Amino acid sequence: EVCIVVPKLSRAATGEDCVASLVRELEGAGLLVERVRGVPAEFIKLSASMGILGRAASEMQMKKLTCIGMELQFEWEQVAAFVRQPDGSLFSWRERFTCFRYLIYGIVNKTNSEISLKFDDKEFYWKQNESLLRRLEDEGVVKLVFPLHEEIKRKQLLRNWALNWHDFTWQPIDEVYSYFGTKIATYFAFLGMYTRWLFFPAVSGLATQLIDFGSFQWLVLPAFFIFVISWAVFFLQFWKRKNSALLARWGINYSFAEYKASANELEPIRHYLSIEREEEKNFDDAPAEKRRLQRNEWSGVLLRIRNNAIIVLGIICLQLPFELAYAHLYEKTETEALRYVLTALYLVAIQYYTRIGGKVSVILIKYENNQGEQSSADSLIYKVNTMTQQSWFML
């Protein structure tokens, strides 16, 4: 279910290399390991029994919905009391991958001394209480860690979802959630609802272009603007209801930040929890810690304000003059054919501008003090949408 990519040895090893040590430690953690030697690299495939994943979830203190509607800490001994996924599995894809990361990054050096590791001509040391996989990543031995597809479910989704030509609006959202997780399922649920709701402004806009309203023609555009604004308000409210219904059906009533093990964490979860307990015991440093957190919070707010100001200045100084020039040329152009050509060129320019703006936004986010992946994603969406909506508004 999970694959670790390591480079191939450039020469025959004289002794046990660090990859062999990693495989031995993974097997000691209860994982099933298969080594596949490819042409560019070597792939270490990992799988685990449900008992291993369940005990890992219990050690992580993962919260899951119970049959009585309460969200409690998962206990492997009481597995029958917890709600299963729509496809009948105990854990969702995200939860399974979180358990795997907990297991593989939780392999630490428990001895009283450093352990020497070798790979080709490189030699380095595995320190006490240090994650083995993290050390191998820092040394460049482990290139990538990623989840593998489950072919049966992937082909089922491909047949029932991507290649379903009978009903364009229907999506197997529950199956998408079980396989890809909450974020991907919510994205496609929003996209499906948004696409269906676009039918109303599309019909209204087409009617304003094809129907001659005579003496009331001057009221058409203001009425259409009011309709679009009302449509946006209603769509947002109905989406909130649908999103809440989906989260309730999936048993999710907490934010992603409450997960102790997100996909971006590289430190072992056990080490993280031990540090958290030590910080809870140290009550004397509470005022200093509070001041530090407040300083970091204000620093993050100021950085976001600065970056948003850069985006707004970019719109005013670069995008706005270009759009005003387009509007001026469009008014001066007399033939409809040239107007269509001008609009097509403008649409192509929007695509390139959006790409450049996206790259600039990603660079700016790296210098922001965002609290977690979700905060960074929200900041990126805000910046990209600000530039995109300004471009489409001119149309």
Image (spheres, rainbow, N blue to C red):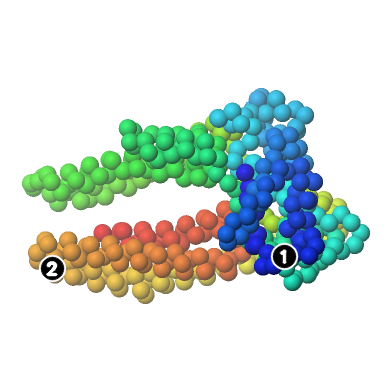
Q: Residues within 10 Å of mark 1 (few under 14, many from 20)?
A: few
Is 343 above or below relative to 245? below
Residue 373 numbered tag: none
The residue lying at 47 percent from left, 58 percent from top is 382
Measure how far apart labels 2 and 1 are at the Cα level: 72 Å
The residue lying at 42 percent from left, 67 percent from top is 357
The residue lying at 37 percent from left, 60 percent from top is 388
* SS category of the residue bearing label 1: loop
Q: Can residue 154 be seen in this snapshot?
A: yes
Residue 160 percent coordinates (x, y): 42, 34
Q: Which one is closest to the eye, mark 2 or mark 1?
A: 1
Amino acid tagged 2:
Thr
> Is residue 392 shown left or right of residue 3?
left
Residue 333 numbered tag: 2
Q: Quadrant of the C terminus?
A: bottom left
Q: Can residue 259 be seen in this snapshot?
A: no
Q: Is disc 2 in contact with disc 1, using a CB cutoff of under 8 Å?
A: no
Residue 311 vs residue 14, the one in the foreground:
14
> Is residue 113 shown left or right of residue 379?
right
Is 182 above or below relative to 104? above
The residue lying at 59 percent from left, 28 percent from top is 88
Residue 160 vs residue 386, the one in the foreground:
160
Amino acid tagged 1:
Ala
* SS category of the residue bearing label 2: loop
Residue 270 percent coordinates (x, y): 78, 50
Is 117 above or below relative to 57? below
Q: Quadrant of the N terminus?
A: top right
* Residue that carries the numbered disc 1 in the rendered image: 12
Residue 138 percent coordinates (x, y): 70, 65
- Extreme left residue here? 214
